[in-house]
Image: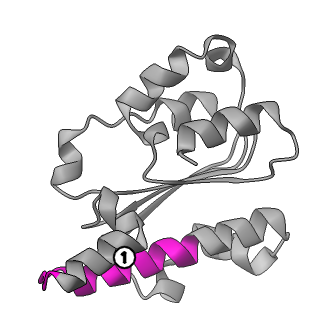
Amino acid sequence: MGSLAQVLFAATNPSVRAVVSLDGATGYRYGQDLLDTAGAFARRSFDTPFAHLTGDSTAQAAVPTSSTFFDATVRGPAYLVRLRGLGHAQFTAFGVLAARASGSPDARAFERGYGEVIRYSGWFLDAYLRGDLAATVRLRDPWTALGASHDDLIVVPHAGR
């Protein structure tokens, strides 16, 4: 399910306790444009815990980003996580496997980045679905546990309003 569908579903179903966007449309201008057409949703506060993980590859720069959903709509706890060198395809196992199969010199970096995506997503879900306090700490300070630098992984927490 794409991030827009997740957000719209969560906004109308209180049983949804967390949403993870793996480089989904909620982080792009076209996604905000689509949410704006959802009428009342644009004015509704979104308080479900939310994590948006995205990359900064050159190919991604061609699609205009937007932090409007994260900055203006999200009212609950949220995290914007940017991983250096990853593109949209590397947020799936298929993208990583394709790089490996093609002999891409970036395959190892993609594998490492995808591993970080999986681990961070797991911590987020453990924190908000299981109440795991250690996972909550890792969300704000993941660098040591991931063996990543602050340049490779940027985390912007959103305390909610």
Residue wearing tag 1: 113
Screen quadrant of the C terminus: top right
Side of 64 where 21 appears, left or right: right
Which residue is rendered at x = 46% and y = 26% of the image? 32
Q: Main secondary structure of the magenta part?
A: helix
Residue 150 seen in the figure? no
Q: Position of residue 138 (x, y in %)?
A: 63, 76
Q: How is the image coloured?
A: one colour
Q: Position of residue 57 (x, y in %)?
A: 21, 58
Which residue is rendered at x = 57% and y = 28% of the image? 72
Q: Position of residue 155 (x, y in %)?
A: 48, 61
Q: Position of residue 106 (x, y in %)?
A: 17, 79
| Placement of 150 over or under 148, stated as above or below | above
Quarter-of-image position of residue 41: top right
Q: Is residue 119 magenta?
A: yes
The region drawn magenta spans 102-120
| Placement of 43 over or under 18, stated as above or below | above
Side of 26 where 56 appears, left or right: left
Which residue is rendered at x = 29% and y = 65% of the image? 86
Dot 1: element? helix
Side of 140 where 81 appears, left or right: left
Q: Nearer the viewer, residue 160 or 34?
A: 34
